Image (cartoon, rainbow, N blue to C red):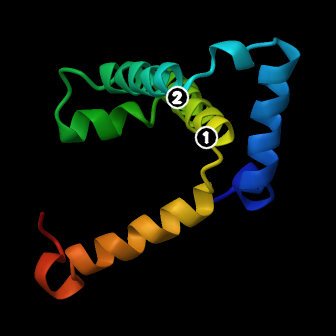
Amino acid sequence: MSGMDERTTVRELRRMVERFVRERDWEQFHTPKNLSMGMAVEAAELMELFQWHDAAGSAALMTRPRPRRAAQEELADVMIYCLAFANRTGIDVAGAIRSKLAKNRRKYPVRRFRGRF
């Protein structure tokens, strides 16, 4: 990690998104359905950047300024929708991630899954 990730908390990000939404009076549109659909649309836009590239080609794209910037913007869009969803539904993002990783540790033990799916 580097840059802002080192200094910014999930709480700060949630508040930034909340303020952005409130300033525009968008709460009325931010239903769980609409926000989850927004997440999916933005994730698809991120995927589209890599469409028709193999694994090496997709990794190489991230070394080029324009595709990297586009991926950064699409990732931000996905994350903004995720945080807006968490704000709307009251989901504790850090708690949800910790819980899911604990579940995945049990489901995919290192000794059985290291280096393979």
Q: Nearer the viewer, residue 20 or 51?
A: 20
Figure quadrant of the N terminus: bottom right
Mark 1: amino acid: Thr
- Quarter of the C terminus within the rendering: bottom left
Query: Residue 107, image x and y in percent?
Result: 21, 74
Residue denoted by label 1 = 89
Look at the image and tell me whether residue 60 can be seen.
yes
Q: Is residue 60 above or below residue 6?
A: above
Left or right: residue 88 versus residue 82 is right
The three-letter amino acid code for the residue at tag 2 is: Pro
Residue 3 makes an appearance in the image? no
The residue lying toward the viewer, choosing from 115 and 90, is: 90
Residue under the point 79% across and 32% down: 18
Instruction: Tell me which corner region of the image, top left, top right, bottom left or bottom right, holds residue 55.
Output: top left
Tag shown at residue 32: 2
Q: Secondary structure at mark 1?
A: helix
Quick one: which residue is furthest to the bottom in this view? 111
Do the numbered discs 2 and 1 sit on residues whose CB atoms are within 8 Å?
yes
Q: Find residue 42 and report its horizontal and vertical position in percent.
A: 45, 22
Q: Answer above or below: position of 55 versus 51.
A: below
Query: Which one is earlier in the sequence, the residue at label 2 or at label 1?
Result: 2
At numbered mark 2, what does the secondary structure look like: helix, strand or loop?
helix
In the displayed structure, 62 sits above or below 116; it is above
Which disc is residue 56 wearing? Answer: none
Taking the image as shown, residue 76 lies to the left or right of residue 11, namely left
Q: Return the x and y of residue 3 as percentages of the image width and height.
A: 73, 52
In this rendering, would 18 be left or right of 94?
A: right
Label 1 crowd bin: few (<14), some (14–19), many (20+), radius 10 Å: few
